[in-house]
């Protein structure tokens, strides 16, 4: 005979709890301050809300079930009473203790699928107990059989509940991502709109191109950057499409070098840098500079708007993974919290670029400031998100591109 206090899965439908939890989430997302949304890593922010608002399905830990013998007071009769009280008698009991993982409080809710037969148990902090009265010590097989049936019934309800919870969790993850992304995009678009009105970046329409590239001249879309701890800062922010256009200019210049090897094979790193500055200044009205002091070092290519850095580029000859790691460290050293878009241009001299490119990816991902790779359609490079040296929450985009540049052979060196 079972002696248990609680009927399980008997309270309101779990959908009511889902609705209340979702309402709490939406309220929290609505109250999320703009600086927190913009200053925090997007993936980490989504994960925070997911962990906080999803449900953890309760699960039996069957490997840790144990039993406890005991005694209980039960009514001696259902009909007789003495001075208004029914007489009690002590009976022997067997208590099956079932530990739970997950949120055990959810076992009070009714799943969408259920039957008219509901299991009973005594609910504790992280376990339930099922108590059986034992009147005949030879009936242990009957007690075991009763417990197995009751346990199977509870497991069935837990499976139904888990299905409902998993469905809610999947939907809430999508909603969190969509909500935060939509709000972030809206903020960036508005900043871009405001910035276009107040801080346009002019192009020199009358300046001829030294090299002809298959791109159209158009103004960069400058918008406010992600807020930092100073809410009054209003520094320009380079849109991704304009970042890609700058890289296209640099890539086409590099391709020109590849196609005209004799003209460039004697050039050093500093010479190559100046060749890139020519088309950039043709587009951006003198905003591109070379060897400009920035933060902790000097950068090869720097584009500024209103005195603020919007793009940093570094030119290096490929000399193996260790040299690339040092170059990334160098970029980290002179990248300030305002800089959001940077690039490293690697030049191969008489080396197979296709063999080099996988080494670039492997080296970048092993760097301690690497956060994640971005989808980037290029045969000659990769794009990543890195964190700044002194602020893990402040991110910048790093693109690494590799090109073949011919090297002067030994015969030509002797002639010189």
Image: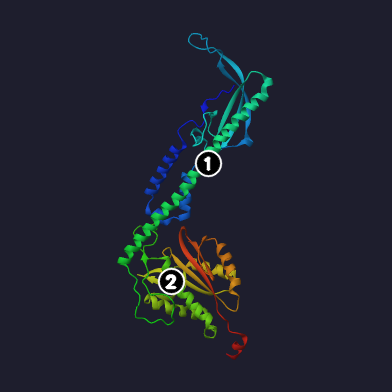
Which mark, by number, is residue 245? 2
Q: Which label sits in the foreground, 1 or 2?
A: 1
Q: Nearer the viewer, residue 97 or 113?
A: 113
**Residue that label 1 marks:** 163
Name the residue nearer the viewer: 305 or 383: 383
Q: Establish if 281 lies above or below 29.
A: below
Give the colouring mode of the picture. Answer: rainbow
Instruction: Specify the quadrant of the image occupied by residue 240.
Output: bottom left
Quadrant in the rendering for residue 3: top right
Q: CA distance from mark 1 to mark 2?
A: 48 Å
Q: Quadrant of the N terminus?
A: top right
Q: Is residue 233 visible?
A: no
* Residue at horizontal 58 percent and vertical 20 percent from the top: 72
* Residue in the image at 44% along x and 49% along y: 175
Residue 409 at what x, y percent from top left? Answer: 60, 85
Residue 245 position, x and y percent, is: 43, 71
For marks 1 and 2, the one nearer the N-term is 1
């Amino acid at each position: 005979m079972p002696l248990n206090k609680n009927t399980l899965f008997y309270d309101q439908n779990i959908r009511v709890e889902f609705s209340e939890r979702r309402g709490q989430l939406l309220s929290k997302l609505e109250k999320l301050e703009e600086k927190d949304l913009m200053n925090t890593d997007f993936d980490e922010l989504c994960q925070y809300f997911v962990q906080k608002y999803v449900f953890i399905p309760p699960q039996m830990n069957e490997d840790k079930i144990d039993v406890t013998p005991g005694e209980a007071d039960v009514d001696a009769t259902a009909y007789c009473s003495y001075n208004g009280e029914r007489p009690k008698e002590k009976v022997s009991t067997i208590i099956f203790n079932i530990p739970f993982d997950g949120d055990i409080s959810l076992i009070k809710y009714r799943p969408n699928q259920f039957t008219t037969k509901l299991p009973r148990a005594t609910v504790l902090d992280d376990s339930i107990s099922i108590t059986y009265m034992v009147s005949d010590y030879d009936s242990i097989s009957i007690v075991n059989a009763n417990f197995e049936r009751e346990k199977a019934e509870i497991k069935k309800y837990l499976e139904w509940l888990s299905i409902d919870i998993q469905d809610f969790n999947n939907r809430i993850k999508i909603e969190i991502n969509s909500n935060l992304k939509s709000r972030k995009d809206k903020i960036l678009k508005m900043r871009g709109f405001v910035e276009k009105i107040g801080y346009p970046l002019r192009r020199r329409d009358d300046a001829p191109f030294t090299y002809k590239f298959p791109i159209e001249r158009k103004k960069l879309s400058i918008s406010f950057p992600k807020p930092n701890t100073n809410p009054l800062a209003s520094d320009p922010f380079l849109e991704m499409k304009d970042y890609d256009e700058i890289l296209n200019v640099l890539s086409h210049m590099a391709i020109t070098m590849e196609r005209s090897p004799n003209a460039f094979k004697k050039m050093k790193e500093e010479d190559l840098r100046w060749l890139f500055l020519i088309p950039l200044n043709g587009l951006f009205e003198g905003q591109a500079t070379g060897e400009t002091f920035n933060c902790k070092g000097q950068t090869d290519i720097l584009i500024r708007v209103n005195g603020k850095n919007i793009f940093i580029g570094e030119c290096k000859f490929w000399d193996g993974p260790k040299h690339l790691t040092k170059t990334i460290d160098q970029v980290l050293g002179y990248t300030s919290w305002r800089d959001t878009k940077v690039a490293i241009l690697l030049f191969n001299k008489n080396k197979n670029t296709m063999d080099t490119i996988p080494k670039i990816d492997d080296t970048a991902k092993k760097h301690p400031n690497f956060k994640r790779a971005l989808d980037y359609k290029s045969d000659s490079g990769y794009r990543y998100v890195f964190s700044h040296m002194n602020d893990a929450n402040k991110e910048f985009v790093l693109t690494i591109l590799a090109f073949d540049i011919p090297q002067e052979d030994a015969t030509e060196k002797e002639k010189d």
